[in-house]
Image (spheres, rainbow, N blue to C red):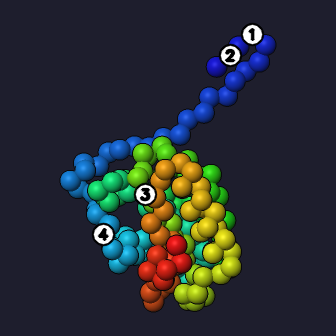
Amino acid sequence: MKVDYFTIPEITVSYKDNVRISERATVKTTEDAAKILSVAFEGCMEHHEEAYVLFLNKARRVLGISCISKGGISGTAMDIRIILQAALKSSASCLLVSHNHPSGSLTPSSEDMAVTKSLQRGCEAVGIQMDDHIVMTSEGYMSFADEGLL
């Protein structure tokens, strides 16, 4: 967009809703979420950390999945603003965040705990429910919700 005295950049954020609602997976349990997420982590599970978010509607049908970060061997950044931007754009009612631990440890780090609390506060501020934070390994998963950490 051009204005006489300066140029304004155009901002676009997209969400392509190209799957019929009846064809979308439903997430009713942590196991349902872990099955969907395990496919996303196939290429990195024991190599480096990545973080994904599942966005759900009120009926708990998957609106989409988004890779929010790719990191190194012992960490990946989870920017709450990026997560909330995608959640708002997709009109998500709730979300589940997940990342993998290449070490195989299912114990959440202090950083995992801190980002979970920050994301939970951010979700509350915009009226989106944070259902879970799931730590994935090649041999299993750990759910913050199931462990009473949310």
Which secondary structure lies at badge 1?
loop
Which secondary structure lies at badge 4?
loop
Residue hosting label 1: 4
Q: Are marks 3 and 1 in contact (CB under 8 Å)?
A: no
Q: CA distance from mark 2 to mark 1?
A: 7 Å
Mark 1, residues whose alpha carbon is within 10 Å: few (<14), some, or many (≥20)?
Answer: few
Name of the residue lying farthest toward the left: 22
Name of the residue lying farthest toward the top: 4
Image quadrant in which you'd find residue 44: bottom right
Labels 3 and 2: the sequence-earlier one: 2
Residue 7 vertical position relative to residue 114 in the rendered view, above or below: above
Q: CA distance from mark 3 to mark 2?
A: 38 Å
**Can you give x and y, in whole percent of width and height, for residue 19 in the image?**
29, 49
Labels 4 and 1: the sequence-earlier one: 1
- Label ID, residue 94: 3
Residue 44 visible, this orientation: no
Residue hosting label 4: 28
**Can you give x and y, in whole percent of width and height, for residue 66 in the image?**
49, 58
Residue 8 visible, this orientation: yes
Image quadrant in which you'd find residue 109: bottom right
Which secondary structure lies at badge 3?
strand
- Which residue occupies 56% across, 67% down? 51
- Which residue occupies 68% across, 74% down? 111
**Residue type for callout 3:** Cys
Residue hosting label 2: 2
- Which residue occupies 74% across, 10% down? 4
Image-based side of 6 in relation to 1, left or right? right
